[in-house]
Amino acid sequence: MTINPPDLCRRRGDYGIDGDFRVIPARWQAMIAAAIVAALIALTVRNIAAGAVVGAVVTGSLTLGLVLFQGSYLYTTRVGKFEVWSRLLTDLRLRGDEQVLDLGCGRGALLLMAAELLPRGRAVGIDLWLADQTGNSPEAARRNAEREGVAERVELETGDITQLPFADNTFDLIVSNLVLHNIPSPADRRAAIDEAVRVLRPGGRLAIADLMATNGYRARLHELGLTDVRRRNLGWRMWWGCPLFPTRLVTATKKI
Ligand SMILES: C[S@@+](CC[C@H](N)C(=O)[O-])C[C@H]1O[C@@H](n2cnc3c(N)ncnc32)[C@H](O)[C@@H]1O
């Protein structure tokens, strides 16, 4: 009898919205975006009423572009990343007894999907709980773990991914989504890659998705002697507003 993997996309938790909310809070950013769209709509209506065809086309196009950009961003953060990661995690064909680490787990989007695939394993999430996601906190991640029914297999650590508090060769799989680009210095991003490789078991797999610097991650993984190092675009479901801001996935395996 074939046992189908759980439908990982069916989420019961609340995973917030990704973004940089360190300087301007999410609510303010949403209000500013709405005000710009409203102003552009008003301008378009005025241009149409005045018979200014070129002006109407310009402001109308800007309005449409901005609405599409915001729609794509919201789709990616609320739906797309879950669809993409549920497929990626399912395709890894885990046995169910692995130790999995999520670098920068936030409210648990990947971490808790992975936990569903680990009935006899352990899913560990580490984060500094910065304002890179709305409502980001260990309490929010813990609440989500309870709502998803996987709390007993989930561990949350507060820590910096450039200095992981785990022993060498601990994890079978390390995943990360949209985290490393938040680390400002290239040296610290490189330290995060080095640390991930250090705590990965020989034969273990790594899957890191990010917005930028992914060529650098691939190069560093090559230098560290990992095999099967690949980088690919995750497609429109993980565009952050438009095709100019795609998400790329770097995967690799640690030599046995
Ligand atoms: C955009 S959120 C993504 C969260 C989660 N991976 C997801 O896809 O839902 C980025 C996360 O990275 C965390 N983060 C950023 N720099 C970090 C660091 N140096 N160490 C640990 N976590 C970090 C933030 O606190 C935040 O939770």
Image (cartoon, rainbow, N blue to C red):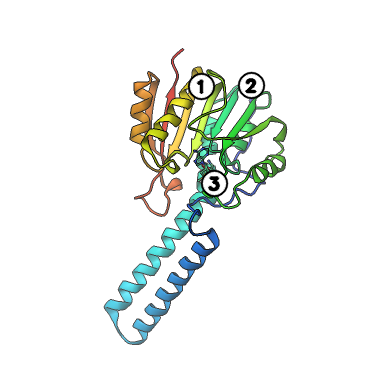
Q: Nearer the viewer, residue 153 or 65?
A: 153
Mark 2 and mark 1: Cα distance apart in space: 15 Å
Q: In which quarter of the image is residue 93?
A: top right
Element type at mark 2: loop
Mark in the foreground, 2 or 1: 1
The residue that mark 1 highlights is 200
Q: Residue furthest bottom?
A: 50
Disc 2 residue type? Asp
Mark 1 and mark 3: Cα distance apart in space: 25 Å
Is 59 left, or right, of 135 in this rendering?
left
Mark in the foreground, 2 or 3: 3
> Residue at horizontal 71%, vertical 43%?
147
Q: Which mark is residue 81?
A: none
The x, y position of residue 100, in whole percent, is 58, 27
The residue that mark 3 highlights is 130
The residue that mark 2 highlights is 97
Disc 3 residue type? Leu
Disc 1 residue type? Leu
Q: Quadrant of residue 126?
A: top right
Q: In this view, does 19 lie above or below 156?
A: below
Question: In the picture, which quadrant includes the N terminus?
Answer: top right
Q: Is mark 3 within 8 Å of ligand 1?
A: yes
Q: Which of 125 and 238 is in front in this view?
A: 125
